[in-house]
Image (tube, rainbow, N blue to C red):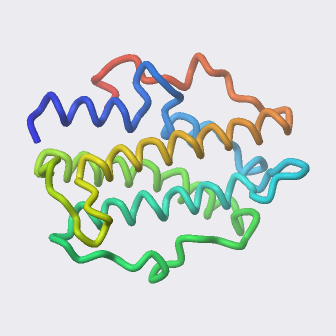
Amino acid sequence: MNEANVTSFKRGLRGMWSHPDPVKVIDKIDFESAGASMPGYPHSIWQILRHMYGWCWLSIDWLRADDNFPNPDKDNYFFAEKAPADEKAWKSAQKEIHDIYDALKDILPGIDMEKKYENLYDNTAGDMLMIMTTHTSYHIAQINMILKANGKMLDMKDLFVEDVAEL
């Protein structure tokens, strides 16, 4: 992938100019809020985050593979626990979003955006990156909704990437 496309996908994944940056959102959530949910909603922030991370890693695995479709059940991409076991587990989860984006930065330059994955309904690598971007953005919005319902809305002005150097 050429440098302009790499930069465009980094911008999309990190929400530059369009939606809150997942890294900045997760970094600002406190341990006490990690297990929060809201009335009538079936998932906590922790459950959404674990699911989101699982699918990010699964997407990275797909993009790294030649055409070997990883099994989404193999690493338990869905979590029943409503909250992290302790503050150390939460800090580890906050670090994990950085690890995900570091892994993406490493693989983006070598991705053939038009490569089709037969085992993924003929989606291309570009399709997979777009799916990952929208999936992550959607879940970050859910997390913000839960925070707001619990009186812990994050200050939006601090959550956007405005400088490409931040990527």
In the rendered image, residue 156, in percent from the top left (x then y), is placed at 62, 21
In-image side of 12 versus 39 (left or right): left
Q: Residue 64's image quarter?
A: bottom left
Who is closer to the viewer here, 126 or 86? Answer: 126
Tell me: residue 58, above or below residue 44.
Answer: below
Compared with 122, 28 (above or below) is above
> Taking 25 as reference, is 63 left or right?
left
Query: In the image shown, does 167 or 47 lie closer to the viewer?
Result: 47
Query: Farthest bottom residue?
Result: 74
Q: Residue at x 70, y 44 (%)?
A: 30
Residue beneath the point at 59% across and 16% down: 157
Q: Could you say where residue 27 lies in the image, as x and y percent from the top left?
A: 56, 40
| Residue drawn where x is 76% and y is 65% of the image | 82
Q: Position of residue 94 (x, y in %)?
A: 54, 51
Q: Residue placed at 64% from the left, 56% from the top?
A: 48
Quarter of the figure that contains the N terminus:
top left
Left or right of 25? Residue 143 is: right
| Nearer-the-camera pick, 23 or 89 | 23
Q: From the image, which quarter does the C terminus lie in?
A: top left
